Image (cartoon, rainbow, N blue to C red):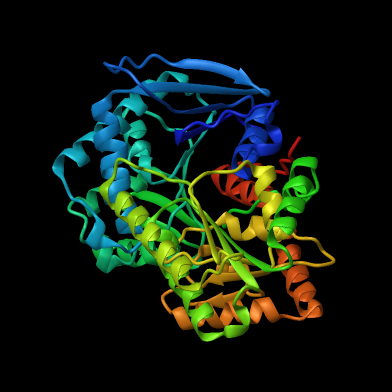
């Protein structure tokens, strides 16, 4: 196959020593990069006093990575600023939290230009270039301006907002116009794709064909729905490793016969954590039978701690968890265990396997792989139940979950009660249907589908497999 160059904000080099704890995306991209002798390019996560464009090449587990360091001002304006204080809240329908500052835009444009200048010498004639996520929307255009004629694809891992929200971005048309430098743009769901098409139809008067091909001012772009999956078979095996079995046993012992509800989320306002706590509080206050018979374990590692909004979320959750435990706890029962730390992939698999309910309540999410990992980690003979927000991208692929409106405490409480009381036969039936879907549309299915669109000269979808 042609050589692939993957570009993302951060690079996650694969590691032979920690292969069991690598995410599905890292494993999938590593597979295609090894097969194509490709390169993974992006920010190292490190600071430098002055940007030099020096590239740090490394090779690990057969994958070549190429990283650059950024200046503190770049990180503030591009990453903390426009990417995470402007685009992230806006694309998650939280326009009231979006900060529109000209300096953020300048930093975003500057870093994308620097990435293009630094990446340019690495691109050879037949390479395929695949750019990932909202941090790097204009990168394709910057490469075209520098004479790159290769096939370039873009995949958005977060939602695309409705047009009425998108137009609140001061430079919205400039940003969307830059996307026509790509040959293929991928979205997780039909909803996100349709929102994009609504925008280009109304704001740019673009011509749109039934297959998602868009023509605007001589440029042709193919918009595709391509939901990412996980390596479900491998994750199911992870749940049976020694570390996972030990964690599962510890959780069963700690539960002392009580039903465990688990939530695992990065500390972020898009995840619906406050709403989740309120729904759980409603369960305890309206169903006396749940007292001392259930507990919620919420794992929420902090993120973006320098952003004020995230500090406010943490303070709110600290207050809510204290209130719930203060009102309902007894001398030997804590109804809500709220943990601000992360766990390894295999330890999480063990926690998921011990849970009666997986509670995933984002207010808006591009996909949400926690929902899929929870299902993959279950014991087929005694599976837990997934309670899932309608507003997670995963909901479109997982109708057998108990689907809820996360804004309604009553719906959350009812769904939790239904899940906790669900007969084994129904739990097994729902789980089997969900697992079949995860195995059918796994991470390699996602990768092969997108690569077939990016390189149509290959004809049928290339069959890339995990090593």
Nearer to me, 77 or 18: 18
Left or right, 202 with reference to 13: left
Left or right, 107 with reference to 360: left
Using the rendered view, name the quadrant where residue 262 is placed: bottom right
Please give the name of the residue rendered at 50% of the width and 67% of the height, measured from the top-left corner: 361
Left or right, 29 with reference to 424: left
Residue lying at the far left in this picture: please name it.
102
Please give the name of the residue rendered at 53% of the width and 79% of the height, measured from the top-left corner: 283
Please give the name of the residue rendered at 69% of the width and 61% of the height, measured from the top-left corner: 255
Work out whether residue 441 can be spotted. no
Residue 97 image position (x, y, % from top left)? 25, 58
Nearer to me, 46 or 119: 46
Q: How many marks?
A: 0
Q: Looking at the image, is 324 positioned above or below residue 151?
A: below
Residue 410 image position (x, y, % from top left)? 47, 83
Residue 325 image position (x, y, % from top left)? 48, 66
The quarter in which the C terminus is drawn is top right
Using the rendered view, name the quadrant where residue 51 is placed: top left
Please give the name of the residue rendered at 32% of the width and 44% of the height, measured from the top-left corner: 83
Work out whether residue 34 can be spotted. yes
């Amino acid at each position: 196959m042609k050589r692939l160059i993957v570009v993302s904000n951060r690079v996650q080099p694969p590691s032979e020593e920690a292969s069991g704890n690598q995410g599905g995306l890292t494993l999938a991209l590593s597979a295609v990069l090894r097969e194509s002798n490709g390169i993974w390019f992006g920010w190292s996560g490190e600071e430098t006093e002055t940007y030099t464009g020096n590239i740090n090449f490394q090779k690990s587990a057969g994958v070549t990575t190429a990283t650059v360091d950024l200046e503190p001002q770049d990180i503030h304006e591009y990453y903390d600023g426009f990417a995470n204080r402007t685009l992230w809240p806006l694309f998650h329908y939280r326009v009231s939290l979006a900060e529109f500052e000209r300096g953020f835009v300048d930093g975003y444009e500057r870093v994308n230009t620097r990435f293009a200048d630094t990446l340019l010498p690495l691109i050879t004639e037949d390479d395929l270039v695949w750019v990932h996520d909202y941090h790097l929307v204009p990168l394709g255009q910057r490469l075209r301006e520098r004479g790159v004629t290769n096939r370039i694809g873009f995949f958005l891992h977060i939602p695309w907002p409705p047009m009425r929200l998108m137009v609140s971005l001061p430079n919205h048309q400039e940003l969307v116009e830059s996307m026509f430098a790509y040959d293929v743009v991928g979205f997780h769901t039909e909803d996100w794709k349709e929102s994009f098409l609504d925008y280009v139809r109304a704001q740019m008067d673009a011509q749109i064909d039934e297959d998602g091909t868009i023509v605007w001012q001589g440029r042709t772009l193919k918009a595709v729905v391509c939901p990412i999956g996980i390596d479900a078979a491998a994750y199911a095996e992870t749940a049976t490793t020694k570390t996972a079995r030990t964690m599962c046993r510890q959780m069963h012992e700690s539960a002392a016969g009580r039903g465990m509800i688990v939530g695992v989320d990065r500390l972020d306002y898009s995840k619906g954590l406050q709403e989740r706590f309120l729904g759980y509080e409603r369960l305890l206050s309206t169903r006396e039978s749940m007292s001392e018979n259930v507990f919620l374990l919420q794992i929420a590692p902090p993120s973006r701690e320098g952003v004020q909004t995230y500090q406010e979320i943490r303070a709110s959750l600290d207050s809510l968890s204290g209130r719930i435990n203060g009102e309902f706890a007894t001398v030997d029962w804590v109804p809500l265990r709220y943990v601000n730390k992360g766990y390894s992939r295999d330890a999480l698999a063990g926690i998921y396997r011990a849970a009666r309910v997986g509670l995933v309540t984002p207010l808006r999410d591009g996909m949400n792989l926690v929902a899929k990992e929870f299902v993959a980690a279950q014991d087929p003979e005694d599976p837990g139940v997934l309670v899932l927000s309608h507003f997670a991208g995963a909901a479109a692929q997982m109708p057998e979950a108990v689907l809820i409106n996360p804004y309604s405490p009553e719906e959350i409480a009812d769904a939790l009660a239904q899940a906790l009381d669900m007969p084994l036969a129904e739990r097994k039936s729902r789980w089997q249907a969900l697992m079949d879907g995860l195995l059918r549309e796994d991470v390699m299915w996602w990768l092969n589908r997108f690569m077939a669109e990016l390189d149509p000269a290959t004809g049928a979808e290339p069959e890339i497999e995990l090593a």
